[in-house]
Image: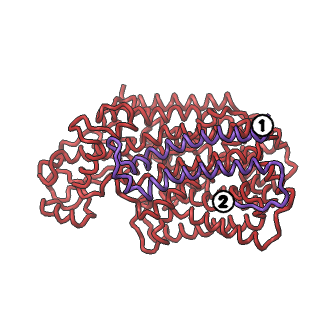
């Protein structure tokens, strides 16, 4: 994420932390769905959990659970970031 | 009590509930009408969003898609849930902070241009109208089949119900009705699934049942499915693809960014009180959606297993291995009368052979057994509705499934109609043509706009375009290619200017529309467009339904290039973007807009 800002404002730190959190979350989002669920699915299918081949499980179950976990983690981390930089709602 | 009376009772009771809620929560102000006064609790909003989101396609069609596409249908599961991650992180909190009523309003203000706002309205209407046609059709089909009327009457009844509670209640009525609709649809979806999972595996959780062993012979459900299907010449359930891997990738991406760009979904996050609530509300929406989406693979897989086992009762190739047509079960006969399940005795032996006759190797083997082509045609949309009957569940469960399917179709149609009405009344009339319109006049205009939208959607539902099955995909492709990039750049790329955004939206929308129309025109196969054969003409093997993501990439590239050669974003707009990025100073939507 690039942007052109000539004058640094006092919220730059907040935005930098926000983007860092975003990149981490989206990396996990990409890994569980596109990487595990599509690109590496045949490799992961060699492993099984119960009756599920692992790649198939990520594509039809696992990725969805991780998505939920991600959104709640993101929401709670963002609240901390907002507070830390004192830009939270009153 | 017989099934018909029971269905009338259950469906009638749910409708009385929806209308009662609409009267209780009717909209008094434009704020009530567009964003439910901006004070819906995040969990309630999450539930309403889930009902808004899960349409007849999710409720009725998805399990059937999974049943017949196996692993390939994962694109729908990941695509329609992963979009909420994008929504929660990239859009919902920022658009809530912006604090206005509609998506075009944001685009118009961020890109300081009424023209940009009009382009956004056009994209919104194109995406929403194509989507709503499919819903109206779903409503018509569901009503007609279970109230035993013809399709047109079914559609009129559905239109009247939507008209009543959406026009009267606006977003406020719709939100509270959708909460009730969510409860009904999720109950209706999971109860049969739990019964079937218990029956097959002894595991009450369908999500675990699909990975468990069968009670009958101790093999895993998925292994059994793989083996049964390959024995009949079908692709292996757990590995079959939809197109090539690149198509799977783009299909998933298109559905994800389409989800995050669909205006009726985004609008829902304007209804919560704070930015913090907007983030968490997307999480709750995903929880409620996942309750259905993690059950769907079990419903699909087990339905396929049950169906195959019903027909293939013994060893493959042995004459006695195939079900004698005269011994077919009751549900089979019932669905035959609808024409959605068809048997044709091609080799005249009185038994049902159901196998993959498109597989040349297997067809050769089948010929030696005296099989002359697959004799069973199954419409994949019947899987969810027929499932409780196949599993022999009591009548009240079947009546409940009908009510659930109607709840899913009605809630989505209402949300879409509201998005269309607000684009017309708030963005076009109040925002551009009559800027000094009073609130009372605007509220009246939005009710009239919504009434016209109901009538228009009903008319299109009576005469659906020939490519009806592909219309939902077009809606996603359009939202993905036009609105999503403009919104993302509006928040994350401060330097993208008016010209960049406008040409980006136009380019993305044009590329996607041309590609979709071109191929839907060429390979004109109604009802099978989701599963159409790979065409050598497709761009790198990407199907038209999966093309929205390519349109989005075009949108981004054009926007960056055009921005480079035109005048920069004004300073006060850059300040606006800075302000959107922090929660501090967020205001109540209702106050903020006037």
Q: Nearer the viewer, mark 2 or mark 1?
A: 1
User: Which colour denotes chain A?
Assistant: purple
Q: Image check: A60 left or right of B567? A: left
Q: Mark 2 — on which chain does it sit?
A: B
Residue highlighted by disc 1: A89
Measured as percent of width and height from the top left, residue B358 is found at 28, 64
Residue at the image position 45 percent from the left and 34 percent from the top: B188
Measured as percent of width and height from the top left, residue A52 is found at 35, 45
Tell me the number on the disc at residue B485.
2
**Viewer-closest of B11 and B384:** B384
Helix, strand or loop at mark 1: loop
Mark 1 crowd level (few <14, some 14–19, many ≥20, 10 Å Cα): some
> Does residue B21 lie above or below B352 as drawn?
above
Residue at the image position 73 percent from the left and 57 percent from the top: B490
Helix, strand or loop at mark 2: helix
Tell me the number on the disc at residue B249.
none
Measured as percent of width and height from the top left, residue B279 is found at 66, 41
Q: Residue furthest top?
A: B1
Q: Quadrant of residue B101?
A: top right
User: Which colour denotes chain B?
Assistant: red
**Viewer-closest of B171 and B438:** B171
Mark 2 crowd level (few <14, some 14–19, many ≥20, 10 Å Cα): many
């Amino acid at each position: 994420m690039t942007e052109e800002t000539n004058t640094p404002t006092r919220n730059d730190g907040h935005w930098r932390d926000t983007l860092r959190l975003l990149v981490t979350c989206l990396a996990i989002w990409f890994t569980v769905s596109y990487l595990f669920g599509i690109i590496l699915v045949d490799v992961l299918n060699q492993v099984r959990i119960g009756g599920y081949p692992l790649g198939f499980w990520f594509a039809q179950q696992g990725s969805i659970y991780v998505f939920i976990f991600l959104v709640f983690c993101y929401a709670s981390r963002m609240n901390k970031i907002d507070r830390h930089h004192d830009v939270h709602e009153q | 009590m017989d099934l018909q009376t029971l269905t009338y009772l259950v469906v009638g009771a749910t409708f009385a509930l929806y209308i009662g809620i609409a009267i209780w929560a009717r909209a008094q102000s434009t704020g009530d009408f567009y964003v439910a006064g901006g004070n819906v609790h995040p969990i309630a909003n999450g539930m309403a969003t889930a009902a808004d989101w899960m349409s007849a396609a999710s409720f009725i069609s998805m399990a059937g898609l999974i049943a017949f596409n196996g692993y390939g249908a994962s694109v729908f599961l990941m695509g329609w849930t992963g979009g909420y991650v994008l929504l929660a992180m990239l859009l919902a909190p920022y658009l809530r902070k912006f604090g206005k009523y509609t998506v075009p309003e944001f685009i118009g203000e961020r890109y300081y241009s009424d023209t940009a706002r009009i382009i956004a309205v056009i994209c919104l209407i194109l995406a929403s109208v194509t989507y709503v046609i499919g819903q109206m059709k779903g409503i018509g089909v569901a009503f007609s089949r279970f109230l035993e009327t013809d399709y047109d009457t079914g559609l009129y009844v559905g239109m009247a119900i939507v008209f009543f509670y959406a026009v009267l209640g606006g977003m406020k009525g719709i939100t509270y009705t959708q909460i009730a609709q969510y409860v009904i649809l999720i109950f209706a979806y999971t109860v049969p699934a739990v019964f079937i999972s218990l029956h097959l595996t002894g595991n009450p959780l369908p999500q675990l049942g699909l990975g468990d062993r069968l009670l009958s012979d101790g093999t895993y459900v998925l292994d059994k499915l793989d083996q049964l299907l390959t024995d009949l010449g079908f692709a292996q359930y757990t590995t079959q693809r939809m197109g090539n891997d690149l198509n799977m990738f783009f299909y998933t991406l298109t559905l994800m960014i389409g989800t995050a760009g669909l205006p009726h979904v985004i609008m829902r996050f304007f209804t919560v009180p704070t930015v913090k609530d907007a983030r968490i509300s997307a999480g709750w929406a995903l929880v409620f959606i996942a309750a259905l989406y993690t059950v769907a693979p079990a419903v699909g897989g087990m339905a396929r297993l049950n169906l195959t086992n019903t027909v293939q009762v013994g060893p493959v190739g042995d004459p006695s291995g195939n079900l004698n047509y005269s011994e077919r079960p009751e549900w089979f006969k019932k669905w035959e009368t609808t024409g959605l399940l068809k048997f044709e005795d091609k080799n005249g032996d009185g038994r049902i052979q159901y196998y993959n006759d498109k597989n040349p190797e297997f067809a050769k083997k089948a010929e030696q057994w005296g099989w002359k082509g697959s004799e069973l045609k199954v419409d994949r949309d019947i899987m969810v509705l027929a499932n409780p009957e196949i599993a022999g569940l009591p009548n009240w469960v079947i009546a409940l499934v009908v009510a659930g399917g109607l709840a899913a179709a009605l809630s989505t149609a209402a949300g879409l109609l509201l998005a269309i009405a607000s684009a017309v009344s708030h963005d076009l009339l109040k925002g551009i043509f009559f800027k000094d319109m009073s609130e009372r006049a605007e509220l009246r205009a939005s009710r009239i706009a919504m009434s016209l939208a109901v009538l228009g959607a009903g008319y299109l539902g009576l005469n659906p375009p020939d490519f009806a099955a592909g219309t939902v995909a077009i809606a996603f492709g359009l939202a993905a290619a036009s609105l999503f990039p403009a919104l993302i750049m509006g928040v994350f790329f401060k330097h993208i200017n008016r010209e960049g955004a406008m040409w980006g939206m136009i380019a993305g929308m044009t590329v996607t529309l041309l590609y979709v129309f071109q191929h839907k025109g060429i390979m004109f196969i109604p009802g099978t467009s989701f599963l159409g054969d790979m065409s050598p003409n497709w761009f790198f093997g990407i199907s038209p339904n999966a093309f929205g993501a390519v349109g989005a990439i075009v949108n981004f590239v054009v926007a960056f290039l055009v921005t480079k050669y035109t005048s920069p974003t004004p300073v006060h707009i850059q300040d606006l973007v800075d302000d959107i990025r922090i929660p501090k100073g967020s205001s109540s939507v209702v106050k903020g807009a006037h």
